[in-house]
Image: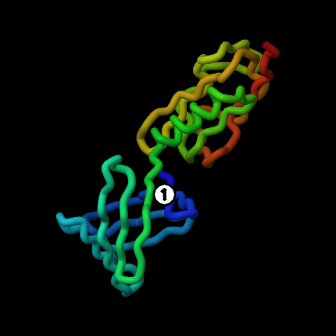
Amino acid sequence: MEIHIGNRIADIQLISKDGNNVVLSIDGKEFEIDVVMAENGSCSILHDGKSFNAQLIRQEDGKTYQVDTHMSSFKVNIVDSQAKYLQMRKKTSETPEDKIASPMAGKVISIPVTKGQEVKAGDVLIIVEAMKMQNSYKASSNGTVKEILVQEGDTINSNQVLITLDLFKE
């Protein structure tokens, strides 16, 4: 998932969790931490022998938090796969795109089209699983499939181009 902390954007993935022991990947770098959450939103984190405390205050939208530490306070916005997908759909509905890319890392589940196939706006071109959710990426306008750059079962990176299209002039 993507986390916005002020102007910084971090790509965070949960690798494993066993009780309070958590392994996270933050921008591709792994961190092993021990996290204890209290009911009141207080959080105690132990990493490399150092202890950190924070107060997490959940905002009304449920995906934004005010994080207060001993030294600072900042706003954190969580952009999950569904929110990223909706942002991408909004963007593609405004401007026809000749490329299909997943906004986050995942795995190609299905490619129901073939190279050279004619497609219409709204046709599903590829299905990607990210964060245990399947997302269908659709053509934003009419055209033909120019290239399919991945195969079913492939692991993909965030913003990797998966399919290119030749769009029809309307």
How many badges with numbers are in the image? 1
Relative to 168, 62 lies left or right: left
- Label 1, secondary structure: give it: strand
Question: For the residue carrying disc 1, how many other residues have a C-alpha within 10 Å: few (<14), some (14-19), or many (20+)?
Answer: some
Above or below, 75 against 153 in this view is: below
**Residue 81 picture location, percent across and down:** 47, 43
| Quadrant placement of the C terminus | top right
Above or below, 25 against 80 in this view is: below
Of residues 88 and 166, which is closer to you in this image? 88
Of all residues, the one furthest to the bottom in this rendering is 49
- What residue is shown at x 44% (from left), y 53% (from top)? 78
Relative to 129, 169 lies left or right: right
Of residues 10 and 149, which is closer to you in this image? 10
**Residue 130 picture location, percent across and down:** 49, 42
| The quarter of the displayed image where residue 77 is located | bottom left
| The quarter of the displayed image where residue 148 is located | top right
**Residue 134 picture location, percent across and down:** 46, 33
- What residue is shown at x 53% (from left), y 32% (from top)? 109
Relative to 130, 144 lies left or right: right
**Residue 154 picture location, percent across and down:** 60, 40
- What residue is shown at x 30% (from left), y 57% (from top)? 58
Residue at which label 1 appears: 3
- What residue is shown at x 40% (from left), y 83% (from top)? 71
Of all residues, the one furthest to the left in this rendering is 39
Relative to 41, 128 lies left or right: right
Above or below, 149 against 70 in this view is: above
Q: Which amino acid does label 1 sit on?
A: Ile
